[in-house]
Image: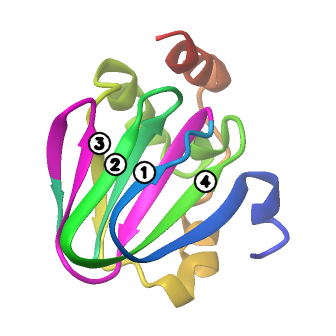
Amino acid sequence: MHKRLEKYIESYDEIQNYKTYELILNGGMIVLINQEINCEVIIENNFYQLESFQAILINAYEKSVHIQSSEKINITAIRFKGAGPSFFYEEYVDELMHNQKEPIFIENNILINELNTYFQNRFKPSKLPFNIMKIIDLLDG
């Protein structure tokens, strides 16, 4: 991982060779990038289809998140530190605050071998003065 990104991103976790997988909650948001076959993301018994090469932003503060497929999955989970996601996905923070149990579909065709470049290009200093307060509201929600 690029040194600049280490301030905001905790880890890139590869989830491979499972048909079902439960994400470990991290008290923050996670981006899931599906690298192969379609699968389902389950949040509080609600099912969301995650298609090949699609990425979603999810709230992983305290709700259990499961991933399942009829075939072995190949997904990358990007775990952020603190308010980290707001520096990359500020435009989605309000939406996630109002729909905390639903994933937000953010993009298609993010290549795993280009994650550093992708996140460096997405990085934007926050324009909102109370950006971090939105993250705190999600924790309380």
Structural distance between the alpha carbons of marks 1 and 2 = 4 Å
What is the distance, in whole Å, between disc 3 and disc 2 at their CAs?
12 Å
At which x and y percent is residue 86?
57, 40
Whether label 1 touches label 2, CB < 8 Å: yes
Q: Nearer the viewer, residue 22 or 99?
A: 22
Which amino acid is tagged 1? Glu
Percent from the top left, x then y, of residue 113?
54, 89
> Which numbered disc flags the more N-terminal residue, 4 or 3?
4
State the separation of the CA atoms marked 1 and 4: 14 Å
The amino acid pointed to by label 2 is His
Name which of mark 1 and mark 4 comes first in the sequence: 1
- The label on residue 22 is 1
Disc 2 element: strand
Q: Nearer the viewer, mark 1 or mark 3?
A: 1
Q: CA distance from mark 1 to mark 3?
A: 15 Å
Characterize the local packing of mark 1: few (<14), some (14-19) or many (20 or more) Cα atoms within 10 angstroms: few
SS assignment at label 3:
loop
Tell me: residue 124, above or below residue 95.
below
Between 95 and 102, the residue placed more toward the observer is 102
The answer to whether the residue labelled 3 contacts the one labelled 2, judged by CB atoms less than 8 Å apart, is no
Which region of the structure is painted magenta? 27-48
Q: Amino acid at mark 4?
A: Arg
Q: Nearer the viewer, mark 4 or mark 2?
A: 2
At a point 28% along the width and 24% down the height, the residue shown is 99
Which quadrant of the view contains residue 38? bottom left
Q: Residue at x 25, y 60 (%)?
A: 68
Classify 10 Å Cα crowding around label 3: few (below 14), some (14-19), many (20 and above). Answer: many
The disc at residue 103 is 3
